[in-house]
Image: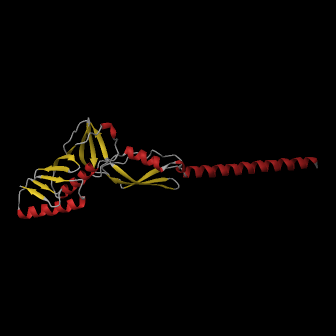
Amino acid sequence: MHHKGSLKNWWGKLSTSFLFILVFGLTFSLLYRLDGRFRVSGIQVLGEADEYPFKGKEQYDGQHIWSIDPEDVHIYLKNANPYYRIVHIEKKYPSTIQVEVSRLVPSAYLQVAEGYFLLSREGIILEKVREIESEKFPLITFYQHVPYTMFQRGDEIGFKEVKDTLYFLEIIHSARLKVNSIDIEGFHMLGLYTEEGTFLFSSEKDSELQKYQFEQSLKQLSVEGVQFDTLDVRFEKPIVRL
């Protein structure tokens, strides 16, 4: 009887140990699977252009998605991709980071102390260079002193005169005119120079009104076949100098 009791106890302990190992193994396997499911497996980019591959898609692979700060992702991707604006970042559980971007198109060079900034239409710095290698984009000469180290790639130019000038540059481009150079002499004097003539704008006057007056004046001059030297829309009424 004592032998049978010992065998029974041994079998009970063995069953308990086996059950413990089985439960532990299943729990470990489940936790391992869950851990793997919640590790980032890639960044999904919405709005990427084929000619400008988006960089840093694998930067967060393998990290736990819950531990990732979207603001840190924004800063990293912004620095890695100056030709894109990071519009929105969202963590898509269990394992994907979704990033919505918009393409930033180069518009003009801004001359600064000891170098140049290549600006997008929105005034974002796409590149910082010491020398201009291509004349594809017009050069903006700015009356203010801007140190080369004051801004970094991906930063937005805070000068209203510069951003207004980029806006008017696109308006002139929309009229199928090529701007060769730009001179910002002050808040009231934004000069854009083309082969067809000079166009003067101001940061002190409503931009949409200047756009309307520019388009209407240019249309009228074209209809009348008038060759002009300067179209100035800085004042109440446009001024045309022949």
Visual colour scheme: secondary structure
Q: How many marks?
A: 0
- Name the residue at the right extreme: 1
Q: Is residue 14 left or right of residue 105?
A: right
Residue 202's spot in the image, x, y percent? 21, 53
Q: Nearer the viewer, residue 171 or 207?
A: 207
Residue 208's spot in the image, x, y percent? 24, 61
Task: Specify whether residue 54 is in view.
Answer: yes
Image quadrant where one finds the C terminus: bottom left
Q: Nearer the viewer, residue 49 or 80?
A: 80
Residue 185's spot in the image, x, y percent? 20, 45
Quarter where residue 219 is shown: bottom left
Quarter where residue 226 is shown: bottom left
Q: Is 215 placed above or below 19 here?
A: below
Q: Residue at x 40, y 46 (%)?
A: 77
Task: Specify whether residue 137 is in view.
Answer: no
Q: Is residue 23 left or right of residue 213?
A: right
Q: Residue at x 30, y 42 (%)?
A: 127
Q: Nearer the viewer, residue 100 or 25?
A: 100
Q: Nearer the viewer, residue 175 or 233?
A: 233
